[in-house]
Image: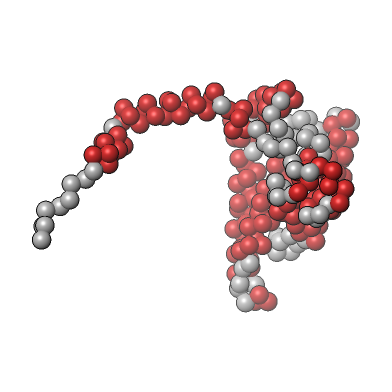
Amino acid sequence: MDTQPHARPQHQNLLHQARQSPRHHCHFSRTFQRVLEEAGAVFDSRPDAISAQITSDGYLTLALSPSGDQWAKMRRVMRSGVLSNAVFQWLHEKRSEEADHLVRYVYKQCKNPDSNGSVNVRDAARHYCGNVIRKMVFGERFFGSRMADGGARVEEREHVDGLFAILSCLYGFAIADFLPWLEVLDLDGHKKKITNAIKNVRRYQDPEIKKRIEMWEKGLKSEEV
């Protein structure tokens, strides 16, 4: 019986040496970065899908728009005015505030005798995401008065449910993406589901947006608030 350890294949030795080489790692990082820069538009582009078109109201948002001149303009604005490091640091306090609120909510649920101290983790996580978005976009956690335990009310639940309903259909397989003339039939049911979800979401979002616009027009709020 052969008691000697089997020799490692040559290609595995080379691969192992390459992984241990800092020079190779740096060279690979620079190459990968250059490829991403050269093909950035290809990686960032989105397919032309009916679900994305309905969700973005005719490709009015950057995240769902196919590449093109309008996409390039929106990308420059997003990188300089929305996704910049200054804005990220500016919103850090709001994100931290929602994280603290989540901890307090979970603690209260654990101390609640009516629920035997049980916590619905899925429900808490879903509404934490909704709270963070509403806090950063609208500056408010709730659309109206708050619950005693800090949990979500009917308005916040319908808003979050609408967002997740949209995500469940976004870029889903639809026969109308391949045969556009079948869009009116809505064989997959995605169009109806997304449309109804958008109505529920906008029912709560649009009043907040209109209120913010009116405050800007009257000079009661600045763009930085």
Residue at 87% from the left image edge and 39% from the top image edge: 210
**Looking at the image, is 7 positioned above or below residue 58?**
below
Q: Which quarter of the image is occupied by the C terminus?
A: top right
Along the line of sight, the residue nearer the viewer: 74 or 32: 32
The picture places residue 52, in percent across and down from the top left corner, at: 75, 42
Residue 27: percent from left, percent from top: 37, 26
Q: Foreground: 64 or 145? A: 64
Quadrant of residue 124 in the image? Answer: bottom right
Q: Is residue 84 left or right of residue 64?
A: left
Write the residue at 46% across / 29% down. 32
Q: x, y (%) of residue 34?
A: 48, 24
Q: Quadrant of the N terminus?
A: bottom left
Picture residue at 61% right of the left edge, 68% below the top: 119
Note whether residue 173 is visible.
Answer: yes
Q: Is residue 186 above or below residue 72?
A: below
- Horizontal side of 122 relative to 184 (left or right) equals left
Is 61 positioned to the left or the right of 22 in the image? right
Viewer-nearest residue: 64 or 48: 48
Total numbered labels placed on residues in the image:
0
Give coordinates of residue 129: x percent, y percent. 66, 51
Name above or below for residue 109 compared with residue 211: below
Whether residue 199 is visible here, answered yes or no, is no
**Which residue occupies 70% across, 53% down?**
168
> Coloring scheme of the render?
secondary structure
Answer with left or right where residue 181 lies relative to residue 103. Answer: right
